[in-house]
Amino acid sequence: MGLFEKAEPDNQTPIADHSELSTLLLQGQDMIPQLAQAHRSWGLGTADRWGLDQQTGLITWTFPDKSATAPAQILASYNRSSGSWMWAWANPSILPEMSRASGEIRDWAQARGHHTLAEPTIAADDQKADTLSALALRITEATGFYRGPSGAAFAIITFGPVTLTANDGSTSTFAINIG
């Protein structure tokens, strides 16, 4: 079943509203480059390294002159080699606290009859992974988005306000408000 197809309804299955899904997709596709551009102002995409600590719930980017940290949620992992997308809520290696947003997407999809979006794993190529990322970003109303590379796989991560810490210890916060 395709991403925008729905199962045959039974008496308990809500009928999927494809216009709502299409609107959210378009909004999410617009949001990703806008958020990327805004976050580039503090250096997103240019860090020497990055890491995600599931115990603290923080993503960290390290630069020669500063570090940046933000509260994060793991939405999914996308593996280009196997052509698969796995929601974080279905991945036993991800702590439940780190997959709350992913679970919200599942619950949202189930409540609206978009059952394909609520499957633990979805066959995906780059285009479908981009579509799922855009939908997930919009549904969760995240203010930051990062595809954390790890070989052929990517962790799909959203994040909140970024705390920038200069080497001298001074800090500042970068936040985006949506709405």
Image (tube, rainbow, N blue to C red):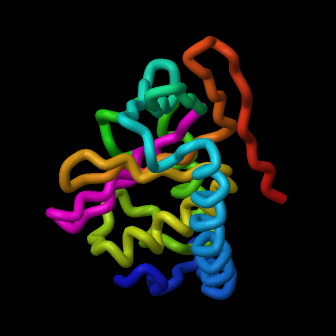
Q: Residue at x 56, y 29 (%)?
A: 69
Residue 3 in percent (x, y) is at: 43, 79
| Magenta region includes residue 82 | yes
Pick whichever, 115 or 123, lies toward us: 123
Instruction: Find the residue positioned furthest to the left.
Output: 81
Q: Compared to 16, does 168 lie above or below?
A: above
Q: Which residues are magenta?
A: 71-89
Q: Quadrant of residue 162?
A: top right
Report the side of 164 relative to 72 (left or right).
right
Q: Residue at x 68, y 81 (%)?
A: 23
Q: Compared to 114, does 153 lie above or below?
A: above
Residue 16 in percent (x, y) is at: 60, 81
Report the side of 102 relative to 143 (left or right).
left
Report the side of 166 relative to 128 (left or right).
right
Quarter holding the N terminus? bottom left
Quarter holding the C terminus? bottom right
Q: Residue at x 65, y 40 (%)?
A: 160
Magenta span: chief secondary structure: strand
